[in-house]
């Protein structure tokens, strides 16, 4: 691996490498999720955030802030998931102008089914990266993330 300078060209090369890695892993895991569960990564992200939330209900706005990928219409996604009885929607008792979302039993069961396979798929996607390299990459990406938050 060559040394990178701080030129815009090397920054663009690094950015493209990160995008290509992300997209490749996303296609791999997303394809497996679709083949096995007919679900997308965006849907699994919603299920995960609802499952991991401390309370049974979360406002749509708070959920949207926590999602990894909000590309597209979150409202349309939530409506489809509600029609499939994976989640329920109710008026927010604290603010009757907004809604809250919660997992249904069916949504919890689907989350449990997918999550164990998901862990294996992620592990397989990263199996060629050593523990030391994972630590280094994790720390570097954390630093990059913090730098973007500070801007």
Image (spheres, rainbow, N blue to C red):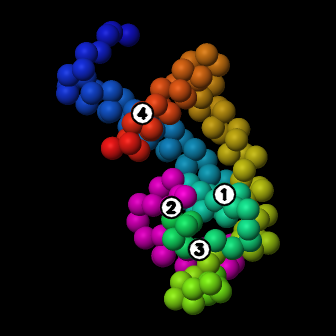
Can you give x and y, in whole percent of width and height, for residue 3 in the image?
Answer: 32, 10
Dot 1: element: helix
Magenta stretch: includes residue 73: yes
User: Between disc 3 and disc 1, whose residue precedes?
Assistant: 1
The magenta stretch spans which residues? 65-88
| CA–CA distance in space, label 4 to label 2 | 20 Å
| CA–CA distance in space, label 4 to label 3 | 29 Å
What residue does disc 3 label? 59
User: Between disc 4 and disc 3, whose residue precedes?
Assistant: 3
Q: What's the residue at 68%, 45% (across, down)?
A: 118
User: Between disc 1 and disc 4, whose residue precedes?
Assistant: 1
What residue does disc 2 label? 65
Can you give x and y, in whole percent of width and height, for residue 111 in the image?
Answer: 72, 59
**Residue contact at pointers 1 and 4, CB within 8 angstroms:** no
Image vertical order of residue 47 relative to residue 130, above or below? below
Dot 4: element: helix
User: Between disc 2 and disc 1, whose residue precedes?
Assistant: 1
| CA–CA distance in space, label 2 to label 1 | 14 Å
**Residue contact at pointers 3 and 1, CB within 8 angstroms:** no
Can you give x and y, in whole percent of width and height, for residue 49 in the image?
Answer: 64, 59
The residue nearer to you, when weighing 36 against 23, is 23
- Give the quarter of the image for residue 4: top left
Q: What's the residue at 59%, 22% (across, down)?
A: 135
User: Between disc 3 and disc 2, whose residue precedes?
Assistant: 3
In the rendered image, the quadrant that contains the C terminus is top left
Can you give x and y, in whole percent of width and height, for residue 114 in the image?
Answer: 71, 53
Magenta stretch: includes residue 61: no
What residue does disc 4 label? 144
| CA–CA distance in space, label 3 to label 2 | 10 Å
């Amino acid at each position: 691996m060559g040394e990178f300078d701080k030129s815009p060209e090397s920054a663009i090369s690094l950015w493209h490498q990160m995008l290509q890695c992300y997209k490749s892993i996303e296609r791999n895991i997303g394809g497996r999720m679709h083949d096995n569960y007919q679900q997308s990564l965006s849907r699994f992200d919603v299920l995960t955030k609802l499952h991991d939330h401390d309370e049974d209900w979360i406002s749509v706005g708070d959920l949207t802030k926590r999602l990894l990928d909000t590309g597209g219409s979150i409202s349309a996604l939530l409506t489809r998931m509600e029609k499939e009885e994976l989640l329920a929607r109710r008026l927010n008792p604290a603010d009757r102008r907004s809604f809250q979302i919660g997992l249904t039993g069916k949504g919890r069961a689907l989350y449990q089914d997918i999550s164990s396979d998901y862990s294996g798929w992620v592990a397989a996607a990263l199996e060629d990266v050593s523990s030391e390299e994972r630590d280094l990459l994790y720390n570097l990406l954390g630093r990059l993330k913090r730098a973007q938050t500070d801007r």
